[in-house]
Image (cartoon, rainbow, N blue to C red):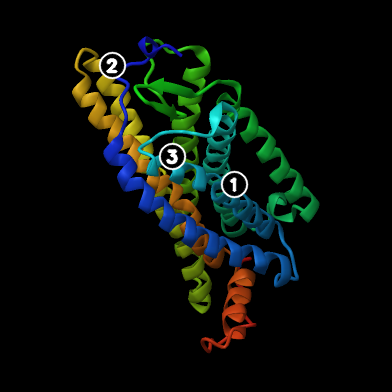
Amino acid sequence: MNNSTFYCLTIHYNVARTLAPMLIVEFVLGLLGNGIALWIFCFRVKFWKPSMIYLLNLVIADFLLMISLPFRIDNYIRGEHWIFGSTVCRINLFTLAMNKTVSITFLTVVAIDRYFKVVHPHHKVNTISLRGAIKIACGIWILVGLLNYYPLSSNLVKKYKNNSLCRSYSPYNKLSFIIIWHYGVFFLEFVFPFCIIMFCTISIIMKLKQRKLDRNKSRIRRTVNILIVIVVVFTVCFLPTTAAGVIAMMIKKLNPDVCYSFVIAGEVFHACLGFTYLNSVLDPVVYCFSSPTFNRAYKKALASTGLCSISLDYNNSEYD
Protein backbone atom coordinates (compact mmCIF):
# COMPACT_ATOMS: atom_id res chain seq x y z
CA MET A 1 0.00 0.00 0.00
CA ASN A 2 1.13 3.55 -0.67
CA ASN A 3 1.77 5.51 2.53
CA SER A 4 -0.20 8.42 1.04
CA THR A 5 -3.26 6.22 1.57
CA PHE A 6 -2.91 6.66 5.31
CA TYR A 7 -3.57 9.57 7.60
CA CYS A 8 -0.76 10.52 10.01
CA LEU A 9 0.80 7.05 9.92
CA THR A 10 3.51 6.50 12.54
CA ILE A 11 5.22 3.76 14.54
CA HIS A 12 4.28 3.52 18.22
CA TYR A 13 7.68 2.64 19.67
CA ASN A 14 6.84 3.58 23.27
CA VAL A 15 3.59 1.61 23.16
CA ALA A 16 5.46 -1.41 21.81
CA ARG A 17 7.91 -1.30 24.73
CA THR A 18 5.00 -1.22 27.17
CA LEU A 19 2.86 -3.85 25.52
CA ALA A 20 5.60 -6.48 25.09
CA PRO A 21 6.08 -7.26 28.82
CA MET A 22 2.38 -6.73 29.52
CA LEU A 23 1.37 -9.31 26.91
CA ILE A 24 3.95 -11.79 28.16
CA VAL A 25 2.36 -11.67 31.63
CA GLU A 26 -1.15 -11.94 30.14
CA PHE A 27 -0.08 -14.88 27.97
CA VAL A 28 1.35 -16.83 30.92
CA LEU A 29 -1.60 -16.14 33.23
CA GLY A 30 -4.17 -16.69 30.49
CA LEU A 31 -2.59 -19.97 29.40
CA LEU A 32 -2.50 -21.20 33.00
CA GLY A 33 -6.06 -20.15 33.87
CA ASN A 34 -7.66 -21.39 30.68
CA GLY A 35 -5.53 -24.54 30.66
CA ILE A 36 -6.92 -25.46 34.08
CA ALA A 37 -10.41 -24.49 32.91
CA LEU A 38 -10.18 -26.70 29.80
CA TRP A 39 -8.91 -29.61 31.91
CA ILE A 40 -11.87 -29.20 34.28
CA PHE A 41 -14.36 -29.04 31.41
CA CYS A 42 -12.88 -32.17 29.80
CA PHE A 43 -12.27 -34.35 32.85
CA ARG A 44 -14.16 -32.98 35.86
CA VAL A 45 -17.54 -31.82 34.61
CA LYS A 46 -19.86 -34.82 34.43
CA PHE A 47 -23.27 -33.17 34.03
CA TRP A 48 -23.51 -30.74 31.14
CA LYS A 49 -26.05 -27.98 30.77
CA PRO A 50 -26.42 -25.30 28.06
CA SER A 51 -24.69 -22.75 30.28
CA MET A 52 -21.62 -25.00 30.40
CA ILE A 53 -21.57 -25.18 26.60
CA TYR A 54 -21.43 -21.38 26.44
CA LEU A 55 -18.60 -21.24 28.97
CA LEU A 56 -16.64 -23.92 27.11
CA ASN A 57 -16.83 -21.83 23.95
CA LEU A 58 -15.49 -18.90 25.93
CA VAL A 59 -12.47 -21.06 26.81
CA ILE A 60 -12.01 -21.99 23.14
CA ALA A 61 -12.10 -18.30 22.21
CA ASP A 62 -9.41 -17.59 24.79
CA PHE A 63 -7.17 -20.25 23.28
CA LEU A 64 -7.42 -18.42 19.96
CA LEU A 65 -5.86 -15.50 21.79
CA MET A 66 -3.19 -17.74 23.32
CA ILE A 67 -2.21 -18.89 19.82
CA SER A 68 -2.06 -15.31 18.54
CA LEU A 69 -0.30 -13.49 21.37
CA PRO A 70 3.24 -14.88 20.82
CA PHE A 71 3.25 -13.31 17.34
CA ARG A 72 2.13 -9.95 18.75
CA ILE A 73 4.73 -10.18 21.51
CA ASP A 74 7.49 -10.77 18.95
CA ASN A 75 6.12 -7.88 16.88
CA TYR A 76 6.33 -5.49 19.85
CA ILE A 77 9.73 -6.70 21.03
CA ARG A 78 11.03 -5.78 17.57
CA GLY A 79 9.61 -2.25 17.94
CA GLU A 80 6.41 -2.97 16.01
CA HIS A 81 8.12 -4.74 13.14
CA TRP A 82 6.28 -7.71 11.61
CA ILE A 83 8.53 -10.42 10.15
CA PHE A 84 6.04 -13.24 9.45
CA GLY A 85 4.61 -12.04 6.15
CA SER A 86 1.17 -11.06 4.90
CA THR A 87 -0.60 -14.42 5.23
CA VAL A 88 0.34 -14.95 8.86
CA CYS A 89 -0.56 -11.31 9.55
CA ARG A 90 -4.04 -11.86 8.15
CA ILE A 91 -4.57 -15.02 10.17
CA ASN A 92 -3.17 -13.41 13.32
CA LEU A 93 -5.41 -10.35 13.11
CA PHE A 94 -8.41 -12.51 12.22
CA THR A 95 -7.95 -14.77 15.26
CA LEU A 96 -7.53 -11.71 17.50
CA ALA A 97 -10.75 -10.24 16.12
CA MET A 98 -12.52 -13.58 16.55
CA ASN A 99 -11.37 -13.83 20.16
CA LYS A 100 -12.73 -10.42 21.02
CA THR A 101 -16.10 -10.77 19.27
CA VAL A 102 -16.69 -14.37 20.38
CA SER A 103 -15.74 -13.52 23.97
CA ILE A 104 -18.13 -10.57 23.99
CA THR A 105 -20.90 -12.65 22.42
CA PHE A 106 -20.67 -15.58 24.82
CA LEU A 107 -20.39 -13.29 27.85
CA THR A 108 -23.62 -11.71 26.60
CA VAL A 109 -25.21 -15.13 26.08
CA VAL A 110 -24.30 -16.12 29.66
CA ALA A 111 -25.96 -12.91 30.92
CA ILE A 112 -29.08 -13.57 28.81
CA ASP A 113 -29.21 -17.18 30.01
CA ARG A 114 -29.06 -15.96 33.62
CA TYR A 115 -31.72 -13.33 32.89
CA PHE A 116 -34.26 -15.88 31.64
CA LYS A 117 -33.55 -18.28 34.50
CA VAL A 118 -34.23 -15.60 37.11
CA VAL A 119 -36.72 -13.19 35.53
CA HIS A 120 -38.63 -15.63 33.29
CA PRO A 121 -38.08 -19.07 34.89
CA HIS A 122 -40.92 -20.68 32.93
CA HIS A 123 -39.92 -19.37 29.50
CA LYS A 124 -39.24 -21.99 26.83
CA VAL A 125 -35.72 -20.57 26.41
CA ASN A 126 -34.86 -22.32 29.70
CA THR A 127 -35.73 -25.69 28.14
CA ILE A 128 -33.05 -25.50 25.45
CA SER A 129 -31.34 -28.88 25.11
CA LEU A 130 -27.61 -29.52 24.93
CA ARG A 131 -27.97 -30.08 21.20
CA GLY A 132 -29.78 -26.76 20.90
CA ALA A 133 -27.03 -24.99 22.85
CA ILE A 134 -24.39 -26.55 20.59
CA LYS A 135 -26.30 -25.33 17.52
CA ILE A 136 -26.48 -21.83 19.00
CA ALA A 137 -22.73 -21.90 19.70
CA CYS A 138 -21.95 -23.05 16.15
CA GLY A 139 -24.21 -20.34 14.74
CA ILE A 140 -22.38 -17.72 16.79
CA TRP A 141 -18.98 -18.85 15.49
CA ILE A 142 -20.19 -18.72 11.87
CA LEU A 143 -21.79 -15.29 12.31
CA VAL A 144 -18.74 -13.88 14.07
CA GLY A 145 -16.49 -15.25 11.33
CA LEU A 146 -18.57 -13.48 8.68
CA LEU A 147 -18.58 -10.22 10.66
CA ASN A 148 -14.79 -10.28 11.00
CA TYR A 149 -13.78 -11.45 7.54
CA TYR A 150 -12.05 -8.13 6.73
CA PRO A 151 -8.60 -9.08 8.13
CA LEU A 152 -8.60 -12.25 6.01
CA SER A 153 -9.67 -10.44 2.86
CA SER A 154 -7.07 -7.66 2.86
CA ASN A 155 -3.31 -7.29 2.84
CA LEU A 156 -2.77 -5.47 6.14
CA VAL A 157 1.04 -5.40 6.12
CA LYS A 158 2.15 -1.81 5.58
CA LYS A 159 5.73 -0.76 4.82
CA TYR A 160 6.68 2.35 6.75
CA LYS A 161 10.28 3.53 7.03
CA ASN A 162 12.25 0.38 7.94
CA ASN A 163 9.30 -1.41 9.55
CA SER A 164 6.57 -3.70 8.34
CA LEU A 165 3.41 -2.86 10.26
CA CYS A 166 0.74 -5.50 10.85
CA ARG A 167 -2.31 -3.64 12.12
CA SER A 168 -6.00 -4.32 11.97
CA TYR A 169 -6.96 -0.69 12.55
CA SER A 170 -5.08 1.93 10.54
CA PRO A 171 -5.98 5.57 9.86
CA TYR A 172 -6.99 5.89 6.22
CA ASN A 173 -7.47 9.17 4.38
CA LYS A 174 -10.50 7.75 2.58
CA LEU A 175 -12.69 5.03 4.07
CA SER A 176 -13.96 2.30 1.77
CA PHE A 177 -17.11 0.32 2.53
CA ILE A 178 -15.17 -2.66 3.91
CA ILE A 179 -13.17 -0.43 6.29
CA ILE A 180 -16.34 1.32 7.47
CA TRP A 181 -17.83 -2.15 8.06
CA HIS A 182 -14.75 -3.17 10.08
CA TYR A 183 -14.88 -0.01 12.20
CA GLY A 184 -18.64 -0.39 12.64
CA VAL A 185 -18.27 -3.96 13.93
CA PHE A 186 -15.56 -2.78 16.32
CA PHE A 187 -17.88 -0.15 17.82
CA LEU A 188 -21.23 -1.98 17.76
CA GLU A 189 -19.87 -5.27 19.11
CA PHE A 190 -19.27 -3.43 22.37
CA VAL A 191 -22.25 -1.07 22.53
CA PHE A 192 -25.10 -3.51 21.83
CA PRO A 193 -23.86 -6.34 24.10
CA PHE A 194 -23.04 -3.89 26.89
CA CYS A 195 -26.58 -2.46 26.75
CA ILE A 196 -28.00 -6.00 26.80
CA ILE A 197 -25.85 -6.99 29.78
CA MET A 198 -26.80 -3.86 31.72
CA PHE A 199 -30.49 -4.53 30.98
CA CYS A 200 -30.13 -8.13 32.21
CA THR A 201 -28.29 -7.00 35.34
CA ILE A 202 -30.81 -4.32 36.28
CA SER A 203 -33.77 -6.61 35.51
CA ILE A 204 -32.36 -9.39 37.68
CA ILE A 205 -31.67 -7.07 40.60
CA MET A 206 -35.20 -5.62 40.39
CA LYS A 207 -36.75 -9.08 40.14
CA LEU A 208 -34.82 -10.41 43.11
CA LYS A 209 -35.84 -7.41 45.20
CA GLN A 210 -39.48 -8.06 44.33
CA ARG A 211 -39.21 -11.71 45.34
CA LYS A 212 -37.47 -10.98 48.67
CA LEU A 213 -36.03 -14.48 48.83
CA ASP A 214 -34.58 -14.23 52.32
CA ARG A 215 -34.18 -17.98 52.58
CA ASN A 216 -32.02 -18.02 49.45
CA LYS A 217 -29.65 -15.14 50.15
CA SER A 218 -26.65 -17.07 48.85
CA ARG A 219 -28.45 -17.72 45.56
CA ILE A 220 -29.37 -14.06 45.22
CA ARG A 221 -25.84 -12.98 45.99
CA ARG A 222 -24.32 -15.39 43.48
CA THR A 223 -26.78 -14.45 40.74
CA VAL A 224 -26.04 -10.74 41.14
CA ASN A 225 -22.28 -11.37 41.42
CA ILE A 226 -22.26 -13.24 38.11
CA LEU A 227 -23.62 -10.21 36.27
CA ILE A 228 -21.37 -7.81 38.16
CA VAL A 229 -18.30 -9.84 37.17
CA ILE A 230 -19.38 -9.79 33.52
CA VAL A 231 -19.95 -6.03 33.64
CA VAL A 232 -16.51 -5.55 35.20
CA VAL A 233 -14.84 -7.69 32.52
CA PHE A 234 -16.65 -5.72 29.82
CA THR A 235 -15.70 -2.38 31.34
CA VAL A 236 -12.06 -3.20 32.02
CA CYS A 237 -11.28 -5.14 28.83
CA PHE A 238 -13.43 -3.64 26.09
CA LEU A 239 -14.45 -0.11 27.08
CA PRO A 240 -10.95 1.49 26.93
CA THR A 241 -10.26 0.55 23.29
CA THR A 242 -13.79 1.50 22.21
CA ALA A 243 -13.61 4.90 23.89
CA ALA A 244 -10.07 5.56 22.63
CA GLY A 245 -11.04 4.56 19.08
CA VAL A 246 -14.06 6.87 19.06
CA ILE A 247 -12.00 9.77 20.42
CA ALA A 248 -9.30 9.24 17.76
CA MET A 249 -11.89 9.28 14.97
CA MET A 250 -13.47 12.44 16.40
CA ILE A 251 -10.08 14.17 16.50
CA LYS A 252 -9.46 13.21 12.88
CA LYS A 253 -12.90 14.50 11.88
CA LEU A 254 -12.80 17.77 13.82
CA ASN A 255 -9.13 18.71 13.36
CA PRO A 256 -7.79 16.85 10.30
CA ASP A 257 -4.89 19.22 9.62
CA VAL A 258 -3.08 18.58 12.91
CA CYS A 259 -1.45 15.17 13.27
CA TYR A 260 -0.05 15.58 16.78
CA SER A 261 -3.33 15.14 18.65
CA PHE A 262 -4.37 12.23 16.45
CA VAL A 263 -1.03 10.46 16.93
CA ILE A 264 -1.38 10.76 20.71
CA ALA A 265 -4.93 9.39 20.52
CA GLY A 266 -3.71 6.57 18.27
CA GLU A 267 -1.03 5.63 20.78
CA VAL A 268 -3.60 5.57 23.58
CA PHE A 269 -5.85 3.33 21.46
CA HIS A 270 -2.94 1.03 20.67
CA ALA A 271 -1.93 0.84 24.34
CA CYS A 272 -5.50 0.00 25.36
CA LEU A 273 -5.27 -3.20 23.32
CA GLY A 274 -3.41 -4.56 26.33
CA PHE A 275 -6.65 -4.30 28.29
CA THR A 276 -8.56 -6.07 25.50
CA TYR A 277 -6.19 -9.04 25.65
CA LEU A 278 -6.64 -9.11 29.44
CA ASN A 279 -10.02 -10.80 28.92
CA SER A 280 -8.28 -14.18 28.70
CA VAL A 281 -6.94 -13.68 32.23
CA LEU A 282 -10.28 -12.56 33.68
CA ASP A 283 -12.54 -15.09 31.95
CA PRO A 284 -11.71 -17.91 34.42
CA VAL A 285 -13.24 -15.70 37.12
CA VAL A 286 -16.44 -15.67 35.06
CA TYR A 287 -16.39 -19.48 34.88
CA CYS A 288 -16.25 -19.78 38.65
CA PHE A 289 -19.00 -17.25 39.29
CA SER A 290 -21.24 -18.51 36.48
CA SER A 291 -21.34 -22.20 37.27
CA PRO A 292 -21.45 -23.91 40.67
CA THR A 293 -20.54 -27.10 38.79
CA PHE A 294 -17.32 -25.50 37.53
CA ASN A 295 -16.64 -23.87 40.89
CA ARG A 296 -16.91 -27.19 42.74
CA ALA A 297 -14.72 -28.92 40.16
CA TYR A 298 -12.13 -26.13 40.40
CA LYS A 299 -12.04 -26.38 44.20
CA LYS A 300 -11.78 -30.16 44.01
CA ALA A 301 -8.93 -29.90 41.51
CA LEU A 302 -7.04 -27.56 43.82
CA ALA A 303 -7.70 -29.79 46.83
CA SER A 304 -6.46 -32.85 44.93
CA THR A 305 -3.04 -31.22 44.49
CA GLY A 306 -2.55 -31.33 48.25
CA LEU A 307 -1.37 -27.73 48.20
CA CYS A 308 -4.40 -26.53 50.11
CA SER A 309 -7.43 -27.80 51.94
CA ILE A 310 -10.76 -26.58 50.61
CA SER A 311 -14.21 -27.28 51.92
CA LEU A 312 -16.43 -28.52 49.09
CA ASP A 313 -20.14 -27.80 49.07
CA TYR A 314 -21.99 -30.49 47.10
CA ASN A 315 -25.40 -29.31 48.21
CA ASN A 316 -25.31 -26.10 46.30
CA SER A 317 -28.45 -25.91 44.17
CA GLU A 318 -27.92 -22.46 42.79
CA TYR A 319 -28.66 -21.57 39.22
CA ASP A 320 -26.32 -23.44 36.92
Secondary structure beneath label 1: helix
Q: Secondary structure at mark 3?
A: helix
- Residue 10 in picture, x, y percent from top left: 30, 25
Q: Nearer the viewer, residue 61 or 230?
A: 61
The residue indicated by pointer 3 is: 75
Residue 253 is tagged as 2
Give residue 64's mark: 1
Residue 198 seen by the camera = no
Decide: is 254 above or below 25.
Answer: above
Mark 3 in CB contact with mark 2 (< 8 angstroms): no
Is mark 2 in CB contact (under 8 Å) with mark 1? no
Task: Kindly report the distance in space between the C-alpha atoms of the residues bearing marks 3 and 2.
Answer: 30 Å
Mark 3 or mark 2, earlier in chain = 3
Quarter holding the C terminus?
A: bottom right
Q: CA distance from mark 1 to mark 3?
A: 17 Å
Which class describes the residues within 10 Å of circle 2: few (<14), some (14-19), or many (20+)? few
Residue type at tag 2: Lys
Who is closer to the viewer here, 14 or 84?
84
Classify residue 258 by image quadrant.
top left
Secondary structure type for disc 2: helix
* Vertical relation: 131 (above or below) 217: above
First of labels 1, 3 by sequence position? 1
**Marks 2/1: CA distance?**
34 Å
Which numbered disc, 3 or 2, marks the residue closer to the eye? 3
Q: Is residue 24 visible?
A: yes
The percent position of residue 251, horizontal first and vertical second, equals: 25, 22
**Of 61 and 219, the residue lying toward us:** 61
User: Measuring 54% from the left and 52% from the top, which residue is drawn there?
Assistant: 111
Residue in view at x 43 percent, y 54 percent: 24
